[in-house]
Image: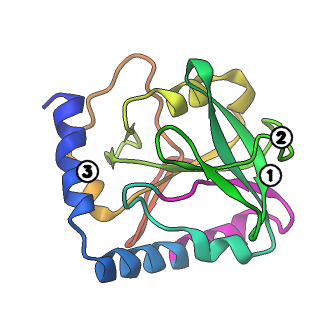
Amino acid sequence: MVKAELRQNLLRSRMALSPELYQEYSDRLCGHLQKFLLAHVLPGQTILAYQPHRQEPDLSQLFHSSYQWGFPRCLPHRQLAWHLWQPGEPLLHNFYGLAEPLATANLISPDAATLLIPMVGFDIKGYRLGYGGGYFDRLLASSEWQHALKIGIAFDSALVPKIPIDPWDLPLHRIFTESGMVVNLV
């Protein structure tokens, strides 16, 4: 199955979740992820996350913890800029419909320790399938971000036997779902 067809099937399945099941899965995932973060990320450190789009797991209950949070803004040439954000600060919707921090928010340097990356699909080897824009592929391949802990975020239903990979695809270090940590490559 090619990436485009696989992506459509996985998105259709995720979008079919009832609001109740979506929230239950998001809450369970956040519980597992919070335990991991408490054990592995020091308070005050910056965690880069996302605002949910198209029923990506909702991590908002974590945003009131003792970490600094950063969200991406989409830039030209399929690049991401990361900005500090805290609860209550405004977000604007971009041309994809994604909620982003204001361009005037403080930029985050690439030395941030932890990246929480939304996924459309994944396999047990840690490879992810995104929306196809290449934003995270460029980020993950960048030497600036090589030392960051890269954690994929998805629901169990996004697990497939094998993600078709291209030469530029890199596996993530860990993947969390509502079942817990399902991939641990570090």
Q: In the depicted view, which residue is nearer to us: 46 or 149?
A: 46
Query: Which residue is at 19% across, 39% downward?
Result: 6
Task: Please provide percent x and percent y for residue 77.
Answer: 58, 17
Helix, strand or loop under label 2: loop
First reached walking from the N terminus: tag 1 or tag 2: 1
Helix, strand or loop under label 3: helix
Name the quadrant containing residue 83.
Answer: top right
Q: Residues within 10 Å of mark 3 (few under 14, many from 20)?
A: some
Res 35 visible: no
Q: CA distance from mark 3 to mark 1?
A: 29 Å
Q: Do the CB atoms of the residues marked 1 and 2 lie less than 8 Å apart?
A: yes
Q: In the depicted view, which residue is nearer to us: 120 or 169?
A: 120
First reached walking from the N terminus: tag 3 or tag 1: 3
| Callout 3 amino acid | Leu
Residue behind mark 2: 107
Residue 41 is one of the magenta-drawn residues: yes
First reached walking from the N terminus: tag 3 or tag 2: 3
Residue behind mark 1: 84
Residue 157 is marked as none
| Callout 1 amino acid | Leu
Query: Which residue is at 52% across, 48% downward?
Result: 98
Highlighted magenta segment, given as a residue range: 32-52
Q: From what the image shows, is residue 173 above or below residue 80?
A: below
Q: Residue furthest left?
A: 1
Task: Please provide percent x and percent y for residue 62.
Answer: 64, 73
Res 49 visible: yes
Q: CA distance from mark 3 to mark 2?
A: 31 Å
Colouring used for the render: rainbow
Query: Which residue is at 78% across, 35% downward?
Result: 110
Name the quadrant containing residue 140.
Answer: top right
Residue behind mark 3: 11
